[in-house]
């Protein structure tokens, strides 16, 4: 893999991506061959007060928390206090588990139970945020389980299909509490956080308020849709969301966790978790539509991406909630890991993590990453184009993250516009497939570059050429 790490390249691309997505702050860390080669903050953890984001800033890691919940369950199994092959109904004698005793803890861990998500914990969080557009009687454990039990049907046989479900990770948290006799957050703190020296990591509002370094994000939330501005928003830690997404930690502390996992459970000379547990965490359970590449699999709280000619096998998980986003990638074969966290869910964490993965392997991100090529292509083609006699124009723009070309005709009202929804067919040659509201939609739109300037000069749609204004 080599001993070098091009931190300058990574920082440059991170800054560009944060500007592009209007992300307020980010923290990024990289472990390479068990050495921490990159640990850096960007932008602000609080914009109004101009407080810098650092790799020690506590950020909500959202669904990355699920890997901690899965590890907690396996720790209890190791103590022979449960088995992931057990029926959930043995621990939670409520609907729909009683009616479907074939649903096991493993099905919950791998999102393969067949139970649709009822959004119980999300509703609880929205109510806590005073977003009472969707109110349901979910204020305690009994009501949450009853809400889940109101599901109309188990839509797939257990183990047949992947279907992500936050609610069922909350149920796993209930089981951990019942068996251990302590709260979920206490169990995670004593059995995972403390042994890994994640001393500031927390799952409570009190932990954030009393942080020893007073280094905690201010959350920023999109207003008025996916392309709206980011506005300051209070952090919410719903107790029902903890097992599914309640961990606040820093880039530096979560690298302790990553270092332990890529070394088979060993951390700084001590075997904290058995290699068998780590192997079980990373063993694929079911095909998932999350992840990239061919045939990604969901394991237990982790996504597995198989090895390719260009990259070792990856173990990863991302997370997002209104006020933060995260991505954690493990590369066990290389004893390496990458973490990215932001104080707003702008979709940039996945891109930055993949950029860091390219740099980690001494490759050029610009030459290899689809996401960067797409962003550059969208920027290149955006603009207004006209027919030679200017009797019609095509305006190409991204509307709510969808690329559209709107053809307007001089002297006609907008009801006669033709709207083309464009998706990439050939990224290198800037050819787009078309979905159109025209009666007989044409199959593609192709953009052409000027030989001298390299900028887009014209666009072809069917037999019609529009020239850039």
Image (spheres, grey):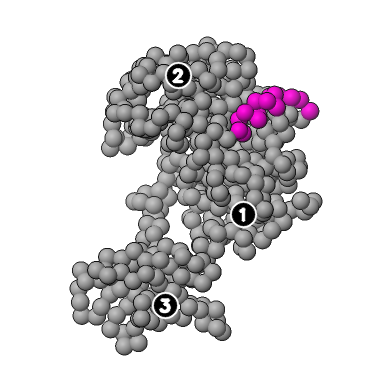
Mark 2 lies on a secondary structure that is: helix
Q: Residues within 10 Å of mark 1 (few under 14, many from 20)?
A: many
Q: Which residue is mark 1?
A: 355
281 or 340: which is nearer to us? 281
In the rendered view, tell whether residue 454 sits above or below residue 207.
below
Residue 223 on image: x %, y %: 37, 49
Q: Which region shows up in magenta?
A: 269-283
Q: CA distance from mark 3 to mark 2?
A: 58 Å
Precedes in sequence: disc 2 or disc 1: 2
Residue at (24% x, 80% y) in the render: 410
User: What residue did someone put label 2 on?
Assistant: 88
Crowd tier of the residue under label 3, counting other residues whose Cα lies within 10 Å: few below 14, some 14–19, many 20 or above:
many
Name the one closer to the observer, 198 or 112: 112
Marks 1 & 3, CB-CB < 8 Å contact? no
Q: Are marks 2 and 1 in contact (CB under 8 Å)?
A: no
Q: Looking at the image, which residue sits at the far bottom? A: 389
Across and down, in percent, residue 419 comes to 30, 67
Q: Which residue is mark 3?
A: 459
Quarter of the image holding residue 297?
Answer: top right
Which image quarter: residue 123? top left
Residue 276: say if magenta: yes
**Which residue: 69% across, 58% down?**
363
Residue 425 visible in the current orientation: yes
Which is in the foreground here, disc 2 or disc 1? 2
Choose mark 3 or mark 2, whichever is in front. Answer: 2
Residue 50: horizontal and vertical position, in percent? 54, 49
Residue 443 appears left or right of 188:
left
Q: Earlier in the sequence, mark 1 or mark 3?
A: 1
Does residue 139 appear in this view? no
């Amino acid at each position: 893999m080599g001993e070098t790490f091009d931190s300058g390249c990574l920082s440059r691309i991170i800054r560009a991506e944060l500007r592009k997505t209007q992300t307020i702050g980010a923290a990024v860390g990289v472990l390479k061959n068990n050495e921490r080669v990159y640990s850096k903050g960007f932008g602000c953890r609080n914009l109004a007060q101009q407080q810098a984001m650092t790799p020690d800033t506590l950020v909500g890691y959202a669904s990355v928390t699920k890997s901690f919940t899965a590890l907690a369950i396996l720790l209890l199994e190791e103590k022979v206090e449960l088995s992931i092959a057990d029926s959930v109904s043995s621990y939670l004698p409520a609907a729909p588990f009683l009616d479907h005793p074939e649903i096991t803890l493993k099905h919950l861990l791998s999102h393969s139970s067949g139970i649709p998500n009822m959004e119980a914990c999300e509703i609880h969080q929205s109510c806590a945020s005073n977003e009472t557009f969707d109110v349901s009687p979910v204020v305690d454990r009994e009501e949450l389980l009853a809400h889940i039990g109101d599901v109309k049907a188990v839509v797939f046989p257990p183990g047949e299909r992947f279907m992500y479900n936050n609610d069922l990770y909350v149920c796993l948290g209930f089981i951990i509490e019942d068996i251990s006799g302590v709260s979920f957050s206490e169990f995670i703190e004593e059995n995972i956080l403390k042994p890994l020296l994640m001393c500031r990591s927390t799952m409570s509002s009190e932990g954030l308020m009393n942080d020893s370094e007073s280094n905690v994000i201010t959350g920023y939330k999109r207003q008025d849709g996916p392309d709206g501005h980011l506005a300051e928003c209070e952090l919410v830690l719903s107790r029902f969301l903890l097992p599914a997404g309640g961990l606040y930690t820093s880039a530096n502390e979560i690298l302790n966790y990553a270092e332990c996992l890529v070394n088979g459970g060993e951390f700084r000379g001590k075997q904290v978790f058995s290699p068998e547990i780590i192997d079980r965490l990373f063993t694929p359970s079911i095909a998932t539509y999350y992840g990239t590449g061919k045939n990604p699999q969901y394991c237990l709280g982790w996504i597995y991406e198989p090895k390719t000619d260009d990259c070792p096998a990856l173990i990863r998980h991302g997370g997002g909630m209104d006020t933060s986003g995260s991505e954690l990638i493990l590369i066990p074969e290389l004893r390496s890991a990458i973490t990215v966290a932001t104080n707003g869910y702008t979709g940039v964490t996945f891109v930055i993590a993949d950029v860091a993965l390219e740099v980690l392997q001494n490759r050029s991100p610009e030459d290899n990453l689809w996401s960067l090529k797409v962003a550059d292509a969208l920027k290149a083609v955006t603009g207004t184009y006209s027919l030679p006699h200017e009797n019609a124009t095509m305006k190409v723009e991204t509307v709510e993250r969808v690329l559209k070309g709107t053809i307007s005709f001089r002297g006609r009202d907008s009801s006669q516009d033709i709207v083309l929804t464009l998706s990439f067919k050939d990224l290198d040659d800037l050819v787009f497939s078309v979905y159109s509201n025209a009666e007989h939609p044409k199959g593609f739109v192709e953009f052409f570059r000027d030989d001298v300037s390299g900028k887009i000069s014209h666009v072809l749609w069917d037999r019609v050429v529009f020239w850039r204004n």
